Every structure is written in structure tokens, then in C-alpha cells.
Image: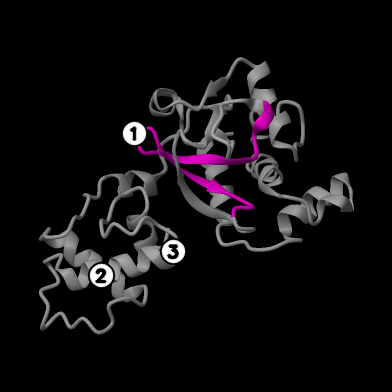
Amino acid sequence: MTAAKMLAEARRDLGLVGRPNRITKDYAARHGAVFLLAPWCQMSVTKWGRDSGNAGPVLPAGDRAYTVWHAEDGDRLGLWYPGTAANIRKHAKPGAIVFFDWGGTDDIAKIDHVGIVEVNLGDGRVQTIEANTGDACKRRVRGPGVIAGFWNPRYAEKAAKDPTEVMVGKLPLIKPGATGRHVKTVFFLLQARGYGKDLDPKVIDPTVYSPQVVAEVKRLQGDKGLTRDGEVGTGETWPVLLGL
């Protein structure tokens, strides 16, 4: 029972689109056909908790399909943190259940959506895995403007850091004008993902983060719903380039 196992289950569903789907079918099999076409963000957290062996810490009151009730479960246990930048920076751990209010409040009763924290970016934002975001399961980057709050389930043992997370966390931030072997890695990863196919490494130095390469990174970012800043960072673009 670890946060790493919870995250591994969530990652399995990245790219899942539409409903009914395996998550809504699983929940409906236990609670009725009405859930087959229902909003499935909370049902996904329920399934990930059950399938990862974390039902006890993640679902202290049993299955949940309603985000407000699941937030209240954490609040009753004394684990609730309002979604301030300071709380997010200090307390949002990988595997935390994070709740959103599109109206921008920290009011549990107004919660609209839920996901789990994959990475704390250290600046008041987190990278999440969320289902039913655009009727799909995707990674998102969220901040205090929409985070109503979160709670950290009491996983039974301290999870070792995910080796992939450790690897990505050691990669540098690549900005326009950068040079070196990591820039070269970006160049060829872009081509492996179907971008920059017309960039000839015999003509354009792949170790220089040139305007042509930056333009292809921005195109990839736009296609993947990321921030189109042309920078390759650990929070968004490195994981996409690496196919994580």
C-alpha cells in the first residue's frame, strides 16, 4: 500500500477517453447502471485506490463517486489542507487527493473535480493525473487559483520515490539558446515523436537549442495541451518527450 502503486494505477489510464469506459463500468457493476455515463473523475480515484491495494487509506468511508463527500472524508480525519500556495508547496505529496473548485474558492461544498498529485512542482503548483478532464484521463498542471484543497492518504508504508520521477527530476530546464548533450537529446526525442522531421542534424547543430527546434517544441506543446513557452522542463515537456 504505497503512493507509488496508486500513481502506477492512475498512469495506466492516461489516454482513456469517453464513457462508458472501464472505470465507469467497474463502478456501475457495484453501484448501478446510472454510473455508466456519469462524471467519472471521482470514480477513477476510487478505482485506482482499490486496484492499487490502497482502499483503506484512500477510501476510508468506502467507494466514492461524489467529490464533496471524498473531500469531507479527508477533513474528518484531520488531513485536509486548504488549497493555498503555501500549503501546496509544503504539504502536497505524490499520491495526495487534490480537489478543485472552478469558482476559485477553498470551500469543500463547492468542489467540482478531483485528481491525484503526481509531482509537487515546488512553486505552488502540482502536476496531476485527472480523469474526466475533457472526458479523458490526462496530466494537468494546477495551481492555487483552482485548487480548493487536498489531503494525503495515510499510505501504510513510506513509498520510495518512483525511479522515473527521480530520473526526470534530474533533467535540466532547457531554454532557448541552451547548448549541450541534453539539447541534443531534445532534438532527437522530438523527431522520435514525429516533430522536426525536416530538421537535418547535418545542417542544424542538434546540440544548440536553436529557433527552429524551439518552434517544433512549441508545436508539440500546443498539440499536447501544454504551456507553449518553448521551454523543456520536468513538469510538463520532458515527460511528454520521454513518452511517460
Judging from the image, what secondary structure is the residue with disc 1 in? loop
Residue denoted by label 3: 224
Q: Residue at position x 12%, y 58% from top?
A: 178
Residue denoted by label 1: 122
Judging from the image, what secondary structure is the residue with disc 2 in? helix
> Colour scheme of this structure image?
one colour
**Residue 179 percent coordinates (x, y):** 10, 60
Magenta-colored span: 109-133
Residue type, label 2: Ala
Disc 1 or 3, which lies upstream in sequence?
Answer: 1
* Neighbour tally class for label 3: few under 14, some 14-19, many 20 plus, Cα within 10 Å: some
Instruction: Quote the CA–CA distance across marks 1 and 2.
Output: 27 Å
Residue type, label 1: Gly
For residue 202, the mark is none
**Residue 208 percent coordinates (x, y):** 11, 66
Residue 208 shown in magenta: no
Disc 2 or 3, which lies upstream in sequence?
Answer: 2
Q: Is residue 207 left or right of residue 58?
A: left
Judging from the image, what secondary structure is the residue with disc 3 in? loop
**Residue 65 percent coordinates (x, y):** 75, 40
